[in-house]
Image: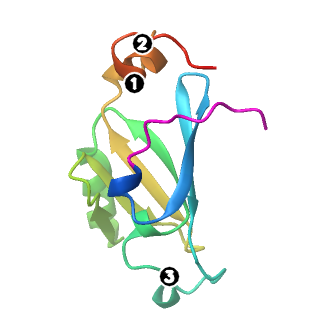
Amino acid sequence: MGLEINPERPEDKLPYRGAWLWIGPEMIHLMELPNPDCAHAEFRPTHGGRDRHFCIGVERLEPLTEALEREGIAYTASKSGRPAIFFRDPDCNTLEVVEGLAWRGAGAREEARGCGEPSRK
């Protein structure tokens, strides 16, 4: 695909193979996991962060967690301690939602790399 790999992925903290790829100021996190392609939750990892998922960002998690609780939809908090949750849609796909978009503005890629560090191509 020609996307640049982010070398800052903390390999020692993640128990699976994968890569973080830059796509503009955002990243795609690819995870190599031995998941069955099954729509039955009992056959999927209990914590969505250990399953295939995509992530979206929101300003605040609280309105979402309140809605999920009101509807009886289970979710788990990120194991890393950052403000993020994981839950499943009706087809058993995992969604990650992370709080905090202040750093996503102009220069986000440079900030994510470490205070305006020059691009590595």
Contact check, label 2 and label 3, Cβ < 8 Å: no
Name the dominant secondary structure of the magenta segment.
loop
Q: Viewed as shown, does residue 108 lie left or right of 76?
A: right
Q: Kindly identify which numbered label has been placed on residue 112.
A: 1
The span shown in magenta is 1-10
| Residue designated by label 2 | 117
Mark 2 vs mark 1: in front: 2
- Residue 119 % position (x, y): 54, 14
Q: Which quadrant of the structure image shows residue 115? A: top left
Q: In which quarter of the image is the N terminus?
A: top right
107 or 91, nearer to the observer: 107
Above/below status of 62 relative to 38: above
Mark 3: amino acid: Arg
Above/below status of 25 relative to 17: above
Mark 2: amino acid: Glu
Of callouts 1 and 3, the N-terminal one = 3
Mark 1: amino acid: Ala
Secondary structure, mark 2, is loop
Q: Viewed as shown, does residue 23 lie left or right of 107?
A: right
Q: Distance between the residues labelled 1 and 3?
A: 31 Å
| Residue designated by label 3 | 44
- Residue 90 % position (x, y): 55, 72
Secondary structure, mark 1, is helix
